[in-house]
Image (cartoon, rainbow, N blue to C red):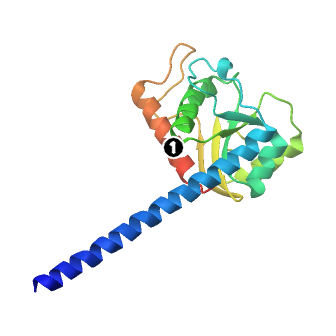
Amino acid sequence: MNIKKTGLLMMLLIIMLCSCASENADKDQTDSNKAAFYQDILAEHEPADLEEYQNAEGESRLVTITFEECADILDSGTGIIYIGSAACAWCQRAVPELNSAALKEDVYILYADSSQSFLKSQYDRICEKLKEYLENGELKAPTVVAVENGVIKGYHKGTVESFHLIDDSNWLNDEQKEELQNIYRTMIKSIAY
């Protein structure tokens, strides 16, 4: 009987070790895919300057893209897209948390700066792809979209429900910051590279 138990325990141990090795191999492959993905993006684009965002800290994880590139990514690409601008008070509150989430997850955010010029046809393509999420068919900032191979995996507009922008002096509290970062981190984890 002890021999059977010992044999069974050995089999379970081998299965567990093989499972752990498989998970590590999958993580290594994902990390490798993610590195290659961002290497391509960073070869063509510079990280955005976060100085215009008052409370953003650390290395910039936002990479500026055009509205045309944004529309193309929504059609068939993969990434986390942020649409907004430093002139937007809501964006001022969201971007520091988005950048922090990107730093924690070791990703870059594709930043379509809505203060830059773009064609109506580009805006219309973006709105068409996001139409099920938009109020009255209008794109509002800040908008963050998780897209994988042209399939929307996550969408978030604004900050958090408990935050109310009264004037320029009020900011997210620590609990609200954590909640917003968790929303973004969940979106980041929803796509495969």
Say few, some or many: other residues with alpha carbon within 10 Å of mark 1 (under 14 / 14 to 19 / 20 or more). some
The answer to whether 189 appears left or right of 42 in the picture is: left
Farthest residue to the left: give it. 1
Q: Is residue 34 above or below residue 114?
A: below
Q: Is residue 180 above or below residue 2?
A: above
Q: Callout 1, which amino acid?
A: Arg
Considering depth in this image, is 99 or 151 the residue closer to the camera?
99
Farthest residue to the top: give it. 169
Q: What residue is drawn where x is 64% and y is 28%?
A: 60
Considering depth in this image, is 166 or 34 the residue closer to the camera?
34
Residue annotated with mark 1: 185
Say which quarter of the image contains residue 82.
Answer: top right
Q: Position of residue 65 (x, y in %)?
A: 78, 38
Badge 1 marks a residue whose secondary structure is helix
For the question of whether residue 54 can be seen, the reply is yes
The answer to whether 186 appears left or right of 111 in the picture is: left
Q: Position of residue 157 (x, y in %)?
A: 60, 39
Could you tell me which quadrant the N terminus lies in? bottom left
Q: What residue is drawn where x is 58% and y is 59%?
A: 29
Farthest residue to the front: give it. 3
